Amino acid sequence: MLGTLLGAAVLGVIITVMEDGDFPGWFPMVMCVLAASIPAFLLNSALPPHLFIVGSFVGALCATVAISFFCQMTVWRAFIASQIYFAFQLVLGLLLYFMLK
């Protein structure tokens, strides 16, 4: 639950910066994070670990659709926002992996 709220906050900051200071709200951000995280988690649990990027890419595509719908952004801008969000998640995950290893 905390991870979803933190992800919604990060995605909200990304979209706020892209939209020049207009925060879309917590409900749309939580829905976008869930739309991104659930398919990525399901795909990553079914695929071998070295193909984790496939799950991230599918999650980013699902997040693009959700961001475009909930935030009324164009698909291209929503895709950029979702890529920034997943890049942040990837860097944070790798940082935690190497710190706790």
Image (cartoon, rainbow, N blue to C red):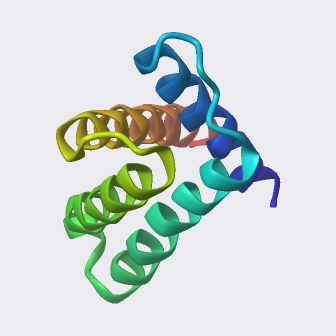
Q: Nearer the viewer, residue 69 or 31?
A: 69
Image height of 62 relative to 88, above or below: below
List x then y, in percent, for residue 80.
25, 34
Asked whether, in this view, residue 56 is left or right of residue 19, the answer is left
Q: Give the quadrant of residue 91.
A: top left
Q: Nearer the viewer, residue 2 or 94?
A: 2
Q: Position of residue 16 (x, y in %)?
A: 55, 21
Spot the residue most to the front: 72
Vertical comparison of 58 with 48: above or below: above
Pick the front one: 48 or 55: 55
Horizontal side of 61 relative to 70 (left or right) equals left
- In the displayed structure, 15 sits above or below 48; it is above
* Quadrant that contains the N terminus: bottom right
Relative to residue 32, is residue 55 depicted above or below? below
Q: What residue is at 62 percent from the left and 36 percent from the top?
A: 24
Q: Measuring 20% from the left and 66% from the top, which residue is drawn there?
A: 54
Q: Residue at x 62, y 53 (%)?
A: 28
Residue drawn at 56 percent across, 56 percent down: 33
Q: Position of residue 61 (x, y in %)?
A: 26, 60
